[in-house]
Image (cartoon, rainbow, N blue to C red):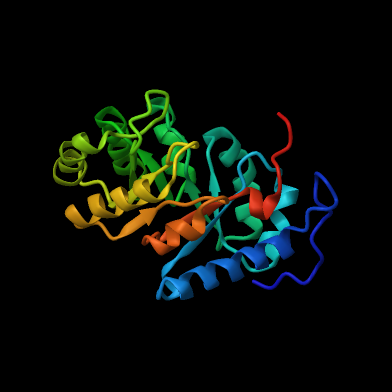
């Protein structure tokens, strides 16, 4: 679908040029892939639009980008119902912690869910996928740093959760996801995620954000989640 009309003015600081930022990040991803001896086409750039209004997302859509990330189900549903009416090729990844009672809405709005981290949620997602006849890709979130305040299954518990997801519930598990501890070197966490994925026959690795995506790409990321470097700081709630 062609969209020749200019995008509406963005909300937020006028100095944020989303299209230019997006082009710069894509060039960085290409460069990082080249340095790692990888093909950049193997890497999906998820533009994390969480917390930003639809008007801030429009320049990225107008520039031809189609893959976005949100972390709140209600916000994603509200924004993307209207955006998808105009931009039906948009693909939405749900990347936040997910409450079991939000499984229905997450399945309805998302094309991929990077939040599977416990048996109860896996059961709720499987039920909703069956009910809705929709099967978004699932990434199992690993708490690589064993942080008590953070979502994610512990590495030692991954095998049991995967068996339930894949063998019992027939969830479409596509890969693994992690968020390394903020104060630590992310490389060991990305390496652990890669090793866990290889051990369990999973090919996709959702890891790396604005501050560390070059490291993630060097260590095998197939999906990088970048928000601030594209959209700027999120508006205050």
Look at the picture and state if 151 lies above or below 227. above
Residue 148 picture location, percent across and down: 37, 23
Q: Quadrant of residue 41?
A: bottom left
- Residue occupying the point 14% across, 40% down: 168
**Any part of residue 136 in sight:** no
- Depth check, front residue: 200 or 9: 200
- Depth check, front residue: 154 or 11: 154
Left or right: where 31 falls relative to 150? right
Q: Quadrant of the C terminus?
A: top right
- Residue occupying the point 20% across, 41% down: 169
**Any part of residue 20 in sight:** yes
Left or right: where 46 falls relative to 24? left
Look at the picture and state if 42 lies above or below 113. below
Residue 20 picture location, percent across and down: 73, 65
- Depth check, front residue: 124 or 56: 56
- Depth check, front residue: 13 or 220: 220
- Residue occupying the point 20% across, 34% down: 157
Residue 218 picture location, percent across and down: 41, 63
Left or right: where 158 falls relative to 59? left
Q: Quadrant of the N terminus?
A: bottom right
Residue 141 picture location, percent across and down: 35, 41
Look at the picture and state if 116 lies above or below 237. below
């Amino acid at each position: 679908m062609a969209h020749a009309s200019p995008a509406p003015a963005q909300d937020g600081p006028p100095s944020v040029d989303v299209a230019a930022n997006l082009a710069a990040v894509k060039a960085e991803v290409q460069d990082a892939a080249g340095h790692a001896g990888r093909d950049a086409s193997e890497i999906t750039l998820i533009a994390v639009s969480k917390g930003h209004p639809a008007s801030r997302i429009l320049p990225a859509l107008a520039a031809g980008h189609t893959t976005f990330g949100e972390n709140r189900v209600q916000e994603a549903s509200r924004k993307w119902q209207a955006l998808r009416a105009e931009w039906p090729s948009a693909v939405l990844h749900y990347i936040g912690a997910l409450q079991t009672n939000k499984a229905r809405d997450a399945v309805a709005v998302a094309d991929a869910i990077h939040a599977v981290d416990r048996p109860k949620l896996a059961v709720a997602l499987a039920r909703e996928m069956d009910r809705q006849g929709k099967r978004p890709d699932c990434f199992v979130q690993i708490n690589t740093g064993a942080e008590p305040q953070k979502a994610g299954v512990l590495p030692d518990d991954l095998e049991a959760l995967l068996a339930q997801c894949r063998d019992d519930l027939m969830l479409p598990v596509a890969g693994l996801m992690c968020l390394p501890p903020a104060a630590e070197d992310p490389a060991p966490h990305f390496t652990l995620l890669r090793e866990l994925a290889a051990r369990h026959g999973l090919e996709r690795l959702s890891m790396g954000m604005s501050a560390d995506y070059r490291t993630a790409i060097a260590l095998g990321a197939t999906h990088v989640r970048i928000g601030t470097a594209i959209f700027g700081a999120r508006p205050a709630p």
